[in-house]
Image (spheres, rainbow, N blue to C red):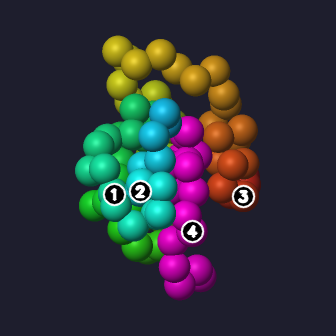
Amino acid sequence: MPTSIPIVDFCNVCGYRPDEAPWGDAGKDPSFEFCPCCNVEWGYQDSSPVGIDRFRRAWLEKGAPWSTPRIEHDGLTTSERLGHLGVVIR
Protein backbone atom coordinates (compact mmCIF):
# COMPACT_ATOMS: atom_id res chain seq x y z
CA MET A 1 0.00 0.00 0.00
CA PRO A 2 1.39 3.44 -0.91
CA THR A 3 2.45 5.64 1.97
CA SER A 4 2.11 8.97 0.18
CA ILE A 5 0.01 10.59 -2.50
CA PRO A 6 1.89 11.29 -5.72
CA ILE A 7 1.85 14.75 -7.26
CA VAL A 8 -0.26 14.45 -10.38
CA ASP A 9 -2.28 16.65 -12.68
CA PHE A 10 -5.06 14.07 -12.53
CA CYS A 11 -7.76 13.30 -10.00
CA ASN A 12 -6.22 10.78 -7.57
CA VAL A 13 -9.45 8.78 -7.53
CA CYS A 14 -10.56 8.49 -11.16
CA GLY A 15 -7.73 9.84 -13.32
CA TYR A 16 -9.71 12.75 -14.76
CA ARG A 17 -7.45 15.59 -15.94
CA PRO A 18 -8.94 18.98 -15.02
CA ASP A 19 -7.74 22.30 -16.44
CA GLU A 20 -5.91 23.02 -13.16
CA ALA A 21 -4.13 20.46 -10.98
CA PRO A 22 -6.48 19.34 -8.17
CA TRP A 23 -3.70 19.70 -5.58
CA GLY A 24 -1.98 22.75 -7.09
CA ASP A 25 1.26 22.91 -9.02
CA ALA A 26 3.35 21.74 -6.06
CA GLY A 27 0.85 19.07 -5.02
CA LYS A 28 0.34 20.66 -1.61
CA ASP A 29 -2.49 23.12 -2.10
CA PRO A 30 -5.77 21.30 -2.72
CA SER A 31 -8.48 23.24 -4.50
CA PHE A 32 -11.35 21.69 -2.49
CA GLU A 33 -13.28 21.60 -5.77
CA PHE A 34 -15.29 18.54 -6.77
CA CYS A 35 -14.16 16.28 -9.59
CA PRO A 36 -16.75 16.41 -12.39
CA CYS A 37 -16.12 12.75 -13.11
CA CYS A 38 -16.14 10.91 -9.75
CA ASN A 39 -17.33 13.77 -7.52
CA VAL A 40 -14.51 13.44 -4.97
CA GLU A 41 -13.67 16.64 -3.12
CA TRP A 42 -10.00 17.29 -3.82
CA GLY A 43 -8.17 17.87 -0.56
CA TYR A 44 -10.75 16.18 1.63
CA GLN A 45 -11.86 12.75 0.47
CA ASP A 46 -8.60 12.13 -1.38
CA SER A 47 -6.21 13.30 1.32
CA SER A 48 -4.88 9.82 2.12
CA PRO A 49 -4.22 6.62 0.19
CA VAL A 50 -6.92 4.87 2.24
CA GLY A 51 -9.44 7.62 1.43
CA ILE A 52 -8.58 7.43 -2.27
CA ASP A 53 -9.04 3.66 -2.30
CA ARG A 54 -12.36 3.79 -0.43
CA PHE A 55 -13.79 6.54 -2.61
CA ARG A 56 -12.62 4.83 -5.83
CA ARG A 57 -14.13 1.50 -4.78
CA ALA A 58 -17.48 3.13 -3.94
CA TRP A 59 -17.48 5.08 -7.24
CA LEU A 60 -16.68 1.95 -9.23
CA GLU A 61 -19.37 -0.04 -7.41
CA LYS A 62 -21.90 2.59 -8.57
CA GLY A 63 -20.81 1.96 -12.15
CA ALA A 64 -18.27 4.82 -12.34
CA PRO A 65 -20.81 7.45 -13.42
CA TRP A 66 -19.87 10.86 -14.82
CA SER A 67 -21.02 12.95 -11.88
CA THR A 68 -21.47 16.46 -13.31
CA PRO A 69 -23.69 16.52 -16.41
CA ARG A 70 -23.23 20.29 -16.91
CA ILE A 71 -19.52 19.69 -17.59
CA GLU A 72 -18.80 17.94 -20.87
CA HIS A 73 -17.59 14.34 -20.59
CA ASP A 74 -13.89 14.01 -21.42
CA GLY A 75 -14.60 11.19 -23.89
CA LEU A 76 -12.39 8.65 -22.12
CA THR A 77 -13.47 5.32 -20.74
CA THR A 78 -13.10 4.60 -17.04
CA SER A 79 -10.21 2.25 -17.82
CA GLU A 80 -8.42 4.91 -19.90
CA ARG A 81 -8.81 7.50 -17.14
CA LEU A 82 -7.62 5.12 -14.43
CA GLY A 83 -4.69 4.22 -16.67
CA HIS A 84 -3.32 7.73 -16.03
CA LEU A 85 -2.86 6.58 -12.44
CA GLY A 86 -1.58 3.11 -13.22
CA VAL A 87 -4.78 1.58 -11.87
CA VAL A 88 -6.19 -1.46 -13.63
CA ILE A 89 -9.78 -2.51 -13.02
CA ARG A 90 -10.85 -6.10 -13.33
Separation of residues labelled 3 and 2 (CA atoms): 18 Å
From the image, tell me which residue sits under label 1. 30
Q: Earlier in the sequence, mark 3 or mark 2?
A: 2
Q: Main secondary structure of the magenta part?
A: loop
Marks 1 and 4, how far apart in space? Answer: 13 Å
| Residue type highlighted by circle 1 | Pro
The dot on residue 23 is 2
Q: Position of residue 35 (x, y in %)?
A: 39, 40
The residue beneath circle 3 is: 86
Q: Is residue 89 something one can see in this rendering?
A: no
Mark 3 neighbour density, 10 Å: few (under 14) some (14–19) many (20 or more)? few
Q: Are marks 1 and 2 in contact (CB under 8 Å)?
A: yes
Residue 3 lies left or right of residue 33; in this view the side is right
Judged from the image, the secondary structure of the residue bearing numbered disc 4 is loop
Q: CA distance from mark 4 to mark 3?
A: 12 Å
Tell me the amino acid under the disc marked 2: Trp
Relative placement, left or right, of 32 versus 10 is left
